[in-house]
Image: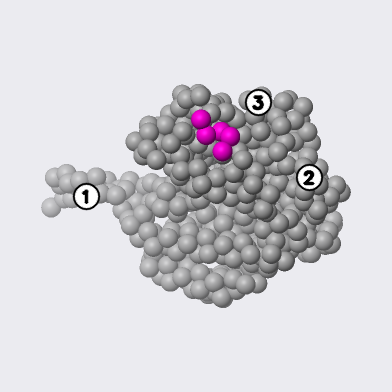
Amino acid sequence: MATLKTISPVDGRVYAERTPATAAGIDAALEHARQSQREWRGVPTAARAAVMERFCAEFERRGADIATGLCWQMGRPIRFAPSEVRGTLERARYMISIATAALADVDPGPKPAFRRFIRREPLGVVFTVAAWNYPYLIAVNSVVPALMAGNAVVLKHSAQTPLAAEAFAECFAAADLPPGLFQVLHLSHEDTERVIGDARVGFVAFTGSVAGGRAVQRAAAERFVGVGLELGGCDPVYVRHDADLKHAIENIVDGAYFNSGQSCCGLQRIYVHESVYEPFTLGAIELIRQYRLGNPLDPETTLGPVVRTAAADAVRAQIRAAVEAGARPAIEEREFAASKAGTPYLAPQLLLDAPAVSSVMREEIFGPVAGVARVRSDAEAVALMNDSAFGLTAAVWTRDAEAAERLGAQVETGTFFMNRCDYLDPALAWVGVKDSGRGCTLSVVGYEHLTRPKSFHLRVTT
C-alpha cells in the first residue's frame, strides 16, 4: 500500500509519512465512533465542557511544538505560527462557553394543557475533512462544537498536515475524552469518498477547493446526509475616497499576503477609488517590498514558501496570464533573492490596473498575489465586487459607518467587514455564498448545523 508523504516546503524533504487506513481499520473506527456516541449523547453539557476545557489546556501547553510543526508541514513563518494556536483556543473556548445556551430546549410559549419544546439532538458521527493551510483553525470550527453537541468526530486531515490531526487526538486523550469519540483516519481520496457514503456518518464538514466540494457532494448524493462546505474565495475589498489610507494599506497588505496568500478569505481583488488610487498603490508597493522571504524557521522571515513547488509554478502561470490580459506587475521577482524557480519560495506580487477579466480578478490564486483596479463610485465598486463566482468575505475601508452598512447590504458575501479583514469572529456565523460553499460554522448558528431539531408535543391529562 502506497504511503502518504508530507513533503516539507522548508527544504523539500519528507517530514512525515503515514500508511492509509485499511478497509477494516475504517470500519472499526466508524463502528467505535457510533457506539461511543450513543453514551456520549447522554452526558450533561457541563461534563462535556469540562473535557473540552482540559483539551484546551493541553493544546495550550503544547503550543510551542504545535507552532514549530506548522512551519515544517506548511511553511508558516515561526514568528506568526503561534497566532494559530491562540486563534484555535479562542474559537474552542468561545464555542464551549455558549454551548449550554445554544443547545438548550426551545420553548415556543405556553399552550393550555400542553407542554411543548424543541430539543437539539446530536447527528451522530461527524466526519471532518480539513485543509492544510490553517490546519488547526479549520478543524476546530467543527471538531469542538460537534463534540460539545454530543456527536463523535472522525477527522481526516490533509496529507500535508497529518501531524495536526494527531496533535488533536493526543490532546483529547490527555483530556480523558472517552475512547472512540475522536479518531483520526489517514485516507486516500477514494476512501474519503467511501466514508462520506457510509450510513454511520451523520454529517460531513469539508474545507477545501470548489472541485473538492463538488466531489464531496457527489459522494453524499445517494444519502440524505448533511454536508457543510467551506470552499474557495477571491475576496474583494473597496477603499473609498474617505478611507484612512495608512490604516487601509497596512490592513489590506497583511490581509492579502499573510500566510503567503494561502487563505480562502485572504484578500485578492482590491478596488480603490480613483481619487486615492495613486497614494494607495504607492504605499502598498512600499510595504510589500519590506517583506522578508525565506526559511520560515528564521524569526526574521515574514513571508514563507507556498506549500509546494507545483503550487508556486501554478501561481506564476496565473500571474503571467493576468499580465497578458493587461495587468502591470509592480514587483520584480529578482527583488526577493530567495524567490527561485523550481522551489516553493515565491516573491509577492501586486498587479496594477488589473482588468476585470484577468485571472487575478476572476480565479482563486492561492499565493502571495493581489490585483488592484480603479473605480469611480460606490456603485461601480459594488458591481465589481459582486462580479465573481465566489462570496466568502468582502470589506470596505471608510470613515462612514452608515455608508459601510449600506454597501454591505448590497454585496453578495458571507461576511462583510469595515476597516478590517481576514478574521473569523467566533461569535459570528462563518458562511459562504455562491461557489464559496454552504452551511455554517461558529456562533450559536453553527450549533444548528451540528444538531437536528426534535419536537416534543405533550398533552397533559388529569
Residue 355 is labelled as 3
Residue denoted by label 1? 115
As drawn, 16 above or below 459: below
The type of residue carrying mark 1 is: Arg
Q: Quadrant of the N terminus?
A: bottom right
**Which stretch is magenta?**
275-279
The secondary structure making up most of the magenta span is helix
Q: Secondary structure at mark 1?
A: strand
Q: CA distance from mark 2 to mark 3?
A: 21 Å
The type of residue carrying mark 3 is: Pro
Callouts 3 and 1 close, C-beta under 8 Å: no
Which of pointers 2 and 1 lies earlier in the amino acid sequence?
1
Q: Position of residue 187 (x, y in %)?
A: 72, 54
- The residue that appears at 35% across and 60% down in the rendered structure is 100
- The residue that appears at 86% across and 49% down in the rendered structure is 342
Give the quadrant of residue 319: top right
- The residue that appears at 70% across and 61% down in the rendered structure is 301
Give the quadrant of residue 402: top left
Label 2 CA crowd tier, 10 Å (few <14, some 14–19, many 20+): some
Q: Position of residue 87 (x, y in %)?
A: 52, 60
Q: Is residue 149 visible?
A: yes
Residue 333 is labelled as 2
- Residue found at the very far right of the displayed protein: 342
Eye-nearest disc, 3 or 1: 3
- The residue that appears at 68% across and 49% down in the rendered structure is 289
As drawn, 250 above or below 11: above
Residue 58 is labelled as none
Colouring style: one colour
